[in-house]
Image (tube, rainbow, N blue to C red):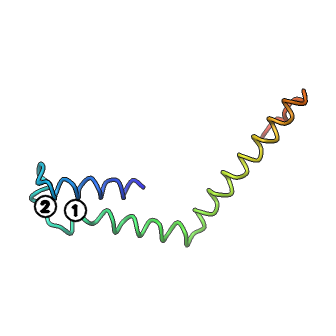
Amino acid sequence: MLFLGLGILLLIMKYMEIGPVALWDWWVVLSPFGLAVAWWAWADWSGYTKKKAVEKENARKQARIDKSRASLGMLPKKRK
């Protein structure tokens, strides 16, 4: 996401001819988009995306369990 935001910012600066970015070559301005594609490809290939999704879902599940235990007056389990 960082590369995408940087790419959009540089693209706007190049188009509006703001600052030193106006003098840069187009390949330099567009390179963050290529880096974003490379990052997403690596994240999907390595399983990083799936791992983060599973961690998020497990955290939501644990929060629901803790909330249910609290409403029943039970102490939540201590996490390691």
Q: Quadrant of residue 76?
A: top right
The residue depicted at 49 percent of the width and 69 percent of the height is 42
State left or right for residue 4 relative to residue 12: right
Q: Which residue is mark 1?
A: 29
Residue 27 place in picture, x, y as percent: 21, 69
Which residue occupies the foreground of this view, 15 or 74?
15
Residue extending farthest top: 73
Tell me: residue 36, above or below residue 80.
below
Secondary element at tag 1: helix
State left or right for residue 58 relative to residue 53: right
The residue depicted at 23 percent of the width and 59 percent of the height is 11
Measure the C-alpha gap from mark 2 to mark 1.
7 Å
Q: Amino acid at mark 2?
A: Trp
Tell me: residue 26, above or below residue 6.
below
Numbered badge on residue 52? none
Q: Amino acid at mark 1?
A: Val
Residue 59 place in picture, x, y as percent: 71, 46
State left or right for residue 39 relative to residue 49: left
Residue 74 place in picture, x, y as percent: 90, 29
The answer to whether the residue labelled 2 contacts the one labelled 1, judged by CB atoms less than 8 Å apart, is: yes
Q: Which residue is mark 2?
A: 24
Tell me: residue 35, above or below residue 65.
below
Q: Quadrant of residue 24?
A: bottom left
State left or right for residue 78 relative to residue 11: right
Tell me: residue 73, above or below residue 9.
above
The C terminus - image quarter = top right
Secondary element at tag 2: loop
The N terminus - image quarter = bottom left
The residue depicted at 60 percent of the width and 67 percent of the height is 47
